[in-house]
Amino acid sequence: MLLRPGWAEDAPALARALRGEARSPNAWSDALADAEAFLAAPDDPTLPRFLVTLRTAGAPLVIGTCGLTRSAAGHVDLHCWIDEQHRGLGFAAEARRALSDIAMTLGQHPLEVQLAA
């Protein structure tokens, strides 16, 4: 597993991961719009966001996202989402540990974990 920043050209790969979560008749267009919005969100170096990817023989496979955000109460929230196909394999736990370490290094306290279902 590898955490890396996402770029605009990652939108189709992220949309494929999101598509399994979308339940509307327009699942592909909804997933693509959600992926584009996630990737276009402004960057804050103190609150990084990453794609969760798996290394393959070809291009890396996007299986989720994780990142830090600040709540209205001032807490730093750690968000992690893994696509349905890859849940239960330890990827979310590994991503949370890595992101928690990054948050501590950046001095982001207190930290609250938010898991996407």
Image: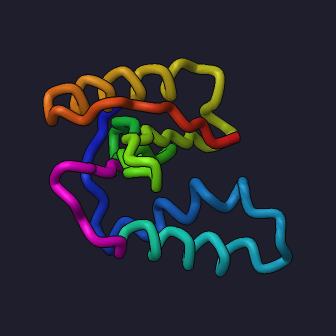
Instruction: Report the side of 89 relative to 101 (left or right).
Output: right
Q: Residue at x 15, y 36 (%)?
A: 106
Q: Which residue appears at 57% of the width and 54% of the height?
A: 17
Residue nearer the viewer, 46 or 67: 46
Q: Residue furthest front?
A: 73
Give coordinates of residue 89: x percent, y percent: 58, 20
Residue drawn at 24 percent across, 35 percent down: 108
Residue at horizontal 38 percent and vertical 31 percent from the top = 111
Most foreground residue, 112 or 59:
112
Q: Is residue 37 above or below residue 4?
A: below
Q: Which residues are magenta?
A: 40-50
Location of the N terminus by quadrant is top left
As rendered, which of 106 and 53 lies closer to the eye?
A: 106
Residue 22 belongs to the span the image colors magenta? no
Q: Tell me which corner region of the image, top left, top right, bottom left or bottom right, holds residue 44.
A: bottom left
x and y percentages locating residue 54 in the rendered image: 40, 36
